[in-house]
Image (cartoon, rainbow, N blue to C red):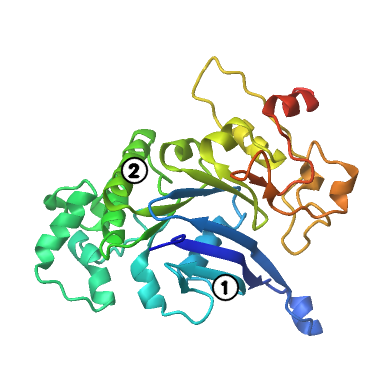
Amino acid sequence: MSGPLLKLEGLHVRFSAARGIRSLLAGREKQTFDAVAGVSLEIEPGECLAIVGESGSGKTTLARAINGLTPIAEGKAWISGEPLHDKPDWTAVRRQTAMMFQDPVGSLSPRMTVRNLILEPFRIHGIAIGEPERKARKLLAAAGLSQEFLDRYPHQLSGGQARRVGVARALALDPALLLADEPTAGLDVSVQGEILTLLNKLRGELGLAILIITHNLNIIRHVADRIGVMYLGRLIETGPVEEVFANPAHPYTRALLAANPEPDPDARLTRIALKGEVPSLLARPKGCEFHPRCPWAHEDCATRAPDLASVSGARRKARCLHPFPDFECRSEAAGGK
C-alpha cells in the first residue's frame, strides 16, 4: 500500500450540550460543541503516534471516531485509502482498526472465559476458524500468556493479565492499526513496562501501526515515533517524540512536560503555573484558545487565531503565533517560574 495507513483532514466530532429545566421550558435550541475540532494527521504503516493532553482534550473521542464508535460531523478520514466519512462499511473498517479500551478488566465481559473473549471477534464478523482452540492458544501466546488462562474469567485475572487478554483479542483479525486508549492505566509501574515492551515487540513482528491515547508522558518515549498534543479538541503541537521533548515549541506542551514527574532525583524541576481553568468547549476563547492561560501571551494572541504551522523544520508543527525556538530561551523569559 502506498501512502499513509490513516489520514484525517479537518476532522470534527460534535455533541449536544445537556439542557437544564429552564432551557427546556423556554424552548431554547440545543447548544452544540466540538469535542474534536479540525484535527488533521497521518499515520504510516508500522508507525506509532501518541496523542496526549489533559482529560477532556478530545483524545479518546478522536480514537472512537476513527473506529466508528462516535459519528464524524465534518471533515474527511481514510483508512488504507477507504473513506470513513462517506457511509463506510464499519464492519470491514473494524477488521483493520482494533481498539483497546482504557479499563483492562471492565472492557471484558464477566460472563465469558478468556477463550471465548479471544474468539468472539471471529463470531462477530462471521469468520470461520478451522482450529479455534489452536488459534486461541496462538493469540494468547502472542500476548505473553500461557494456555492455562483460557478457561479463566476476567475476575480471575490481574490488571496486567487482563490487559494482555485485551491485546490478544485485538490481534485476532490481524488489524493494520491498533487504537490503544490509555494502555497502561491502572497498572503497576513494572507491569506498565511489560505492556509497553509487548506492544513494541508486536509492532516489530507484525508491522502493526499504533495510535496511543494517553496523558502519561513517561510511556511515550518507550513506544512512540511521533507525538501529537491536544488542547480543547485541537492539535496544538506535533513532531518526532525526541524533538518535542527536547525543545517544545508550544507553551502548553512545555507546561505538560514541566509537570511530568522526573525519575532523576538530582534533576532540577521547573514548574510552570498556568492561569485559570480549562475553558468550556461551549465558550471557546477568541484568538488563540490557550492565551487566557499562557504565561507568555502577547497582545495579538487575544485576537488572532493561529494555524498549525511548521516550526524548526517541516517535521515540527505548532499552533502558536509566537512559538519558542529554544527551550532555555523560554525558561529565561518565564523568569524561572
Amino acid marked by disc 2: Asn
Q: Are marks 2 and 1 in contact (CB under 8 Å)?
A: no
Viewer-closest of 242 and 55:
242
62 sits to left or right of 93: right
Q: Element at badge 1? A: loop
Please state the total of marks drawn on the protein image.
Answer: 2
Mark 1 surroundings: few (<14), some (14-19) or many (≥20) residues within 10 A: many
Residue 32: mark: none
Q: Is residue 70 above or below residue 191?
A: below
Residue 266 percent coordinates (x, y)? 54, 14
Q: Residue at x 46, y 60 (%)?
A: 4
User: Residue 252, how many percent across, how many down?
Assistant: 69, 41
Element type where label 2 sits in the image: helix
| 54 and 320: which is toward the camera | 320
Relative to residue 201, is residue 75 depicted above or below?
below
Q: Which residue is mark 2?
A: 200
- Residue 319 x, y percent position in the rendering: 71, 49
Q: Is residue 37 left or right of residue 195?
A: right
Residue 194 falls in which quadrant of the image? top left
Is 167 displayed left or right of 271 in the figure? left
- The residues bearing labels 2 and 1 have C-alpha atoms spaced at a distance of 30 Å
Q: Earlier in the sequence, mark 2 or mark 1?
A: 1
Report which quarter residue 126 is drawn in: bottom left
Give residue 209's quadrant in the image. bottom left
Q: Quadrant of the C terminus?
A: top right
Write down the residue under mark 1. Answer: 72
Amino acid type at image mark 1: Ile
| Residue furthest out toward the top | 266
The structure residue drawn at horizontal position 62% and vertical position 60%, both measured from the top left corner, is 39
> In the visual, does 34 lie left or right of 100?
right
